[in-house]
Amino acid sequence: MTKTIDVEIYGQRYAVNGEADESYVKQLADIVDKQMKQVAAGMRSATPAKLAVLAAFNLAHELMESERRFRQDEADADRRVASLMESIDQQMPSIFSR
């Protein structure tokens, strides 16, 4: 069921339409708001549109880094599993010879 959720981002109110949980939508808005405020703190003056683009750029960077770390962790786990399987295979003959 589509509903409207009011959020505030960088002093502006927005009506977000969708089916997502209200607390989730508000959490997303809070993340964007914090990111815009963080970007604004490092600049003397900027329009809200410019802050929004820079905040989106920072969030996209965080997403890409998270995805890179996930792929690396997944590859590391695959290597560990392969190593453990090899170790188990090496020990199997000794188990059966007892």
Image (tube, grey):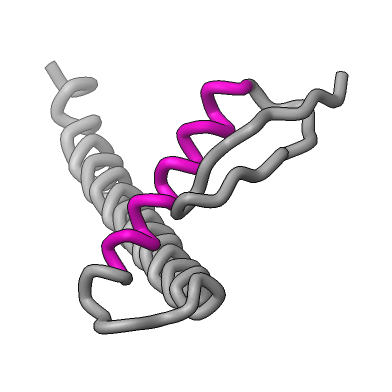
Question: Image quadrant for the C terminus?
Answer: top left
User: Does the magenta portion include 50?
Assistant: no
Position of residue 94 measured from the top left corner of the image (x, y, whole percent): 14, 29
The question of residue 23 being in magenta is answered with yes
Q: Determine whether 5 is above or below 84 in the image.
A: above
Instruction: Please tell me in which quadrant of the rendered image residue 2 appears.
Output: top right
What x and y, as percent, mark residue 54?
44, 76
Task: Identify the main secondary structure in magenta.
Answer: helix
Q: Quadrant of the N terminus?
A: top right
Q: In percent of the image, x 44 and y 73: which residue is there?
A: 51
Of the pair 12 and 79, the residue shown nearer to us = 12
Q: Nearer the viewer, residue 6 or 3?
A: 6
Q: Is residue 52 left or right of residue 15?
A: left
Span highlighted in magenta in the image = 22-39
Nearest to the observer: residue 33 or residue 72: 33
Query: Residue at coordinates 50% horizontally, 69% vertically from top-left?
Result: 52
Left-right relation of 24 to 78? right
